[in-house]
Image: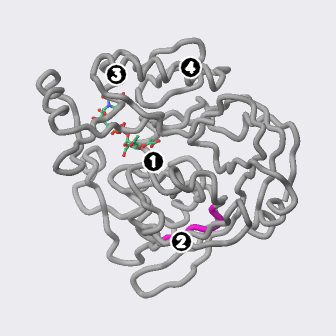
């Protein structure tokens, strides 16, 4: 375990926000975590890759950075394999490892920033696949008492970019290991996302899908190493069919995705672009020129400047479309 005092968090969040924290521990095993919890006082904040996070001020909380490593085969049959993966493992390196071994299920989720331990918290998803489709269970340690618990899939209450760890159990568990069930044969190829389907004439391999997803992401989304960002800043809003029909009447080309009989999801990126915010910039806070949903730090924006910019977008979209956007990123 490594302990740091009064450190800048700039290198620990992909927005590149320069705030200070009082105390930070890098945790690389369950045992280390239990030791820190028993010897220190909270309140604590659990940090993964810092890729879904907007730091709005200096942090008085004690930060526990998840660096639990390791990808191991927990069990396997002729058809499938169960991987046990440390919560601190970089998400994309897990995807590349799986693709290299021809284990199917993670390929559509290539190049998502962040760590394995953070992936169930917001049920990460992209290009037609969400984490809950390959998630089996997870091990976590309760912050309050250091006790280890297993959460099965049904215990996690997964939804669109949502889980019990964002709601009732927010901040209460440190996710140490995540178990994924992947295919070894008869891969469930998913090219339902139109720009992905457009690239293939035949059924692609999982490697080809991963390569295509990487290319699509690189063409649309900014690289946090070059331009600070946290991916999609807002969730795509879910509205009623009636609200949608009224919008469609006014904007016949509005894109949408069905949710259920009563609701429909509309892309926040489209609403933000139509409201005139795509590529706009105030100081160093801005909306990305190629994807309006991604807010960016052009250099030295503070967390509160980015948040003010986000609130201007929320107000304007509300005024123009009657839809209230809610942040997807965690604001602390
Ligand atoms: N659009 C615009 N203008 C924009 C951005 C998008 O008109 O500036 C339109 C696009 O033309 C398209 C629609 O909005 O018709 C959807 O855009 P896109 O396919 O880029 O996806 P998204 O809905 O904006 C979601 C996820 C992404 C994920 C992609 C692909 C959320 C909040 N975001 O974005 O996830 O990669 O689908 O599956 O659900 C993330 O969560 O950080 C993230 C990047």
Which element is circle 3 on?
A: helix
Residue indicated by mark 3 = 318
Q: Position of residue 16 (x, y in %)?
A: 66, 31
Q: Is residue 216 above or below residue 287?
A: below
Quadrant where the C terminus lies? top right
For label 1, the residue is 214
Q: Are marks 1 and 3 in contact (CB under 8 Å)?
A: no
Front-most of 266 and 278? 266
- How far from the left and from the top, in percent, is residue 249? 11, 25
The residue carrying pointer 3 sits among few (fewer than 14), some (14 to 19) or many (20 or more) residues within 10 Å by Cα, namely some
- The residue depicted at 14 percent of the width and 21 percent of the height is 250
Q: If you read the primary sequence from the N terminus, does the residue marked by circle 1 or circle 3 appear first? A: 1
Q: Main secondary structure of the magenta part?
A: strand
Disc 2/disc 1 C-alpha distance (Å): 24 Å
Q: Which residue is mark 2?
A: 179
Q: How many marks?
A: 4
Which residues are drawn in magenta? 175-180
Which residue is identified by label 4?
Answer: 285
Task: Report if the beta carbon of the residue with label 2 is closer than 8 angstroms to ligand 1.
Answer: no
Q: Examine the rendered structure and indicate whether residue 252 appears above or below residue 193.
A: above
Q: Earlier in the sequence, mark 3 or mark 4?
A: 4
Residue 20 in the figure: left or right of residue 57? right
Q: Can residue 107 be spotted in the picture?
A: no
Report if residue 179 lies within the magenta region.
yes
Task: Report, in whole angstroms, how far the alpha carbon at label 2 lies from the one at label 4.
Answer: 38 Å
Who comes first in sequence, dot 3 or dot 2? 2
- Badge 4 residue CB within 8 Å of ligand 1: no
Q: Which of the 4 quarters of the picture holds residue 248?
A: top left
């Amino acid at each position: 375990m490594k302990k740091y005092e009064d450190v800048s968090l700039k290198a620990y969040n992909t927005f590149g926000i320069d705030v200070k924290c009082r105390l930070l521990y890098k945790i690389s095993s369950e045992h280390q975590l239990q030791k820190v919890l028993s010897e220190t006082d909270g309140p604590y904040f659990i940090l993964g890759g810092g890729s879904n996070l907007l730091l709005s001020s200096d942090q008085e909380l004690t930060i526990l950075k998840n660096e639990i490593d390791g990808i191991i085969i927990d069990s396997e049959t002729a058809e499938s394999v169960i991987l046990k993966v440390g919560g601190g493992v970089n998400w994309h390196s897990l995807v590349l490892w799986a693709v290299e071994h021809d284990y199917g299920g993670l390929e559509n989720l290539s190049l998502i920033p962040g760590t394995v331990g953070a992936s169930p918290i917001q049920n990460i998803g992209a290009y037609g696949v969400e984490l809950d489709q390959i998630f089996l269970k997870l091990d976590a340690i309760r912050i309050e008492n250091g006790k280890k618990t297993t959460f099965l899939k049904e215990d996690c209450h997964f939804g669109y970019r949502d889980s019990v760890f964002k709601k009732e159990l927010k901040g209460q568990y440190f996710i140490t290991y995540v178990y994924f069930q992947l295919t070894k044969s008869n891969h469930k190829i998913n090219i339902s996302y139109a720009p992905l389907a457009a690239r293939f004439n035949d059924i692609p391999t999982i490697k080809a899908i991963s390569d295509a997803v990487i290319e699509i992401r690189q063409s649309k989304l900014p690289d946090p190493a070059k331009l600070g960002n946290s991916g999609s800043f807002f969730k795509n809003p879910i509205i009623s069919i009636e609200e949608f029909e009224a919008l469609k009447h006014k904007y016949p080309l509005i894109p949408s995705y069905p949710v259920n009989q009563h609701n429909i999801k509309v892309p926040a990126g489209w609403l933000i672009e139509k409201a005139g915010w795509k590529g706009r910039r105030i100081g160093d806070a801005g909306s990305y020129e190629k994807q309006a949903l991604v807010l960016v730090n052009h250099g030295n924006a503070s967390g509160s400047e980015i948040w003010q910019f986000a609130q201007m977008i929320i107000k304007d979209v509300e005024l123009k479309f009657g839809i209230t956007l809610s942040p997807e990123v965690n604001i602390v």
